[in-house]
């Protein structure tokens, strides 16, 4: 029986390999919005140039991150990935979106803002200045400075309404006094309000207050980029939150107290960008992938005849397994 299972597994793998050349490339949904977001992301990155990445270490560096992930995050197709998730979450013209950004992945911040502009949504943006290595770590050109420059260029109208220092506790934990002062200076330059809460819960509460606005109601969707402490709450990165589009109540987040829990507990979806290399592998994005050709734009699907053959193959495998089990049972009885 075991030998038969191994043979069936090997035969199935061969069958799958033989089917690969016959898969047909088909455009994914929301091509218009994805192309618009891609163009915006490319414009934004061209405007910033090499300044989109800061030095490895600076006064406002909070955590470590591999430079390969930062380079990969600059691929503009991530804007199309963001469009797909936004549309799946129900975002569209005029819909409100809460957005929480950090300085760790400025290119992904751009991807998200380009996607929001492309679908016509209206964001309420909060940011933090601190950044992991190779992110927006230049104290004189932080994420808030980049955002201000992109807004001034007319790429979109949205800007951060309030910002914090970031780091541990969202209050600059891990930064030196010099680093904290440089982060304060960046916030003053941006014109955003300062989020200066007494503790982490205060920082989370202030963001939720800003998201609710005058209507006193949370937007239907939260988008987060990076591993900001406020997203997870007191549990920090121990709080489970999968990357991508999260919808519905998550029992493991039920006892959490961060931004994500506040949305998911009220059946509001959360889009989370964090693991760039994993996301790139999921959508077939590499540094050498031409823009507009990744899995965010094109999916490979089997033609109808191949689906029929696959169904027949599966039926045959199940029949052989059942026959083998029946034969084994008969032999056991004897």
Image (spheres, rainbow, N blue to C red):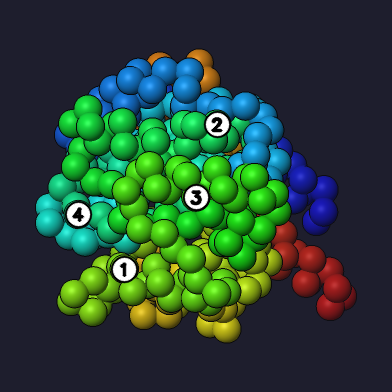
Residue position marked by numbered label 1 in the rendering: 210
Residue 129 vs residue 113, the one in the foreground: 129
Mark 1 vs 3, N-terminal side? 3
| Element assignment for label 2 | loop
Q: Nearer the viewer, residue 308 or 241?
A: 241
**So how many labels did they put on this image?**
4
Q: CA distance from mark 2 to mark 3?
A: 14 Å
Tell whether label 2 touches label 1 (CB within 8 Å).
no
| Quadrant position of residue 138 | top right
**Residue plotted at (31% across, 68% down):** 210
Residue with the mark numbered 3:
184
Where 106 falls versus 100 (above or below)? above
Task: State how far apart marks 3 and 4 are (Cα).
Answer: 27 Å
How many residues crowd mark 2 within 10 Å: few (<14), some (14–19), many (20+)? many
Residue under label 4, please give it.
Answer: 122
Q: From the viewer's perspective, is 332 left or right of 16? A: right
Evaluate if marks 4 and 2 touch, with contact meaning CB atoms under 8 Å apart.
no
- The residue identified by callout 2 is 138
């Amino acid at each position: 029986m075991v030998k038969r299972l191994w043979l069936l597994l090997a035969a199935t793998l061969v069958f799958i390999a033989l089917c690969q050349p016959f898969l047909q490339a088909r455009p994914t949904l929301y091509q218009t919005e994805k192309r618009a977001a891609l163009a915006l992301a490319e414009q934004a990155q061209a405007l910033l140039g090499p300044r989109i990445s800061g030095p490895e270490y600076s006064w406002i560096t909070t955590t470590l991150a591999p430079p390969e992930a930062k380079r990969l995050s600059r691929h503009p197709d991530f804007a199309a990935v963001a469009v797909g998730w936004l549309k799946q979450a129900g975002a569209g013209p005029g819909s409100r979106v809460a957005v929480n950004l950090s300085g760790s992945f400025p290119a992904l911040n751009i991807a998200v803002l380009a996607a929001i502009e492309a679908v016509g949504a209206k964001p309420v943006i909060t940011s933090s200045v601190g950044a992991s290595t190779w992110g927006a770590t230049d104290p004189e050109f932080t994420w808030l400075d980049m955002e201000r420059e992109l807004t001034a260029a007319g790429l979109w109208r949205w800007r951060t309404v309030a910002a914090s220092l970031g780091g541990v506790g969202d209050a600059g934990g891990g930064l030196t006094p010099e680093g904290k002062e440089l982060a304060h200076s960046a916030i003053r330059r941006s014109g955003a309000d300062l989020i200066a809460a007494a503790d982490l819960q205060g920082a989370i509460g202030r963001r939720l207050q800003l998201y609710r606005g005058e209507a006193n109601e949370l937007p239907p969707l939260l988008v987060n980029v990076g591993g900001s402490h406020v997203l997870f709450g007191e549990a920090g990165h121990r709080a489970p939150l999968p990357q991508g589009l999260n919808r519905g109540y998550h029992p493991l987040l039920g006892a959490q107290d961060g931004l994500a829990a506040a949305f998911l507990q009220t059946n509001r979806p959360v889009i989370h960008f964090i693991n760039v290399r994993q996301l790139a592998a999921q959508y077939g994005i590499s540094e050498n992938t031409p823009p507009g050709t990744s899995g965010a734009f094109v999916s490979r699907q089997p033609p109808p005849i191949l689906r029929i053959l696959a169904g027949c193959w599966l039926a045959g495998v199940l029949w052989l397994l059942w026959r083998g089990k029946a034969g084994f049972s008969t032999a056991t009885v004897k």
